[in-house]
């Protein structure tokens, strides 16, 4: 009986450690005011750890009673698939801008950490938590990334009055604003208007708003749609 209690306490310890690790990862998301915060990550970690415990030990009595073999990894494989649905629910697309990818990846990683601890791999689970937390804190904004990435893609869609030399004028204005490798692709054209996509490369420290406002001064341009980083 005491042996059974010690085993159950070990399993409980795994769940508690998984919850703590999930809370650490969720803390960083919470201070960024993300929907999947501390509670979500704790629940994911606990559930993943519990699934792993059930997968490894939950059928021990069945295996001893009957001459059958079970694959202990089958539930773990289903966790990887199932957690993807939760992650997908945190990804939002608004006006061609994607948000929630980091949170979705964090939930997925939290599940993996919970699985590791549930399987008894305490050290790797805790070290992965610390490493992931440090990564999230370092890269929670673009300060460090901007020091590494020198140039970024600049992409805009322009709708303008279809007049002679409108394209060369716009290309000239872009070059004045240090947009390099400019490429123009016409998307739609009629006697009254022309719609085209402009691709280019700008310095990562450049202010995209200044470039857009410089183009907006042209009276023949009726609409500009901007996508940071391209489509």
Image (cartoon, rainbow, N blue to C red):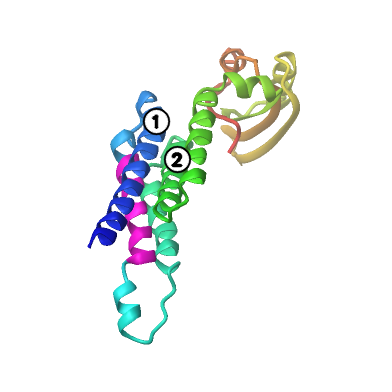
Residue 200: % across, % down: 70, 29
Q: Secondary structure at mark 1?
A: helix
Q: Residues within 10 Å of mark 2 (few under 14, many from 20)?
A: many
| Whether residue 94 is situated above or below residue 141 in the rendered picture | below
Q: Residue furthest front?
A: 2
Q: Which mark is residue 106?
A: 2
| Whether residue 121 is situated above or below residue 101 in the rendered picture | below
Q: Nearer the viewer, residue 53 or 88?
A: 53
Query: Is residue 52 on the magenta stretch?
Result: yes
**Residue found 65% across the figure and 15% down from its top:** 206
Q: CA distance from mark 2 to mark 1?
A: 9 Å
Residue 115: % across, % down: 42, 53
Q: Quadrant of residue 166?
A: top right
Task: Tell me where the magenta segment starts and ends, as one range.
Answer: 41-57
Residue underneath mark 1: 29
* Relative to 47, 223 lies left or right: right
Looking at the rendered image, the quarter that the N terminus falls into is bottom left
Query: Is residue 9 on the magenta stretch?
Result: no
Q: Nearer the viewer, residue 196 or 148?
A: 148
Looking at the rendered image, the quarter that the C terminus falls into is top right
Answer yes or no: do the residues labelled 2 and 1 have beta carbons within 8 Å? Answer: yes
**Residue found 72% across the figure and 21% down from its top:** 179
Residue 126: % across, % down: 47, 40
* Relative to 142, 172 lies left or right: right
Q: Secondary structure at mark 2?
A: helix
Q: Give the main secondary structure of the magenta stretch.
A: helix
Q: Residues within 10 Å of mark 1 (few under 14, many from 20)?
A: many
**Residue found 33% across the figure and 34% down from its top:** 37
| Whether residue 229 is situated above or below residue 143 in the rendered picture | below
Q: Nearer the viewer, residue 172 or 69?
A: 69
């Amino acid at each position: 009986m005491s042996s059974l209690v010690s085993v159950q306490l070990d399993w409980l310890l795994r769940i508690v450690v998984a919850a703590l690790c999930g809370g650490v990862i969720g803390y960083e998301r919470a201070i960024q005011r993300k929907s999947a915060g501390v509670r979500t990550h704790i629940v994911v970690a606990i559930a993943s750890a519990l699934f792993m415990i059930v997968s490894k030990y939950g059928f021990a009595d069945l295996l001893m009673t009957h001459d059958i073999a079970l694959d202990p990894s089958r539930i773990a494989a289903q966790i990887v698939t199932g957690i993807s649905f939760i992650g997908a629910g945190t990804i939002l697309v608004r006006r061609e801008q994607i948000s929630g990818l980091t949170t979705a990846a964090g939930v997925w990683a939290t599940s993996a950490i919970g699985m590791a601890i549930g399987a008894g791999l305490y050290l790797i689970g805790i070290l992965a938590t610390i490493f992931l937390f440090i990564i999230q804190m370092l890269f929670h904004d673009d300060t460090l990334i901007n020091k590494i990435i020198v140039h970024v893609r600049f992409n805009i869609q322009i709708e303008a009055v279809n007049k002679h030399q409108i394209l060369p004028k716009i290309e000239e204005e872009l070059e004045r604003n240090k947009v390099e490798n400019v490429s123009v692709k016409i998307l739609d054209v009629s006697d009254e208007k022309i719609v085209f996509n402009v691709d280019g490369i700008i310095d990562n420290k450049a202010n995209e708003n200044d470039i857009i406002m410089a183009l907006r001064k042209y009276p023949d341009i009726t609409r500009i749609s901007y996508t940071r980083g391209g489509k």
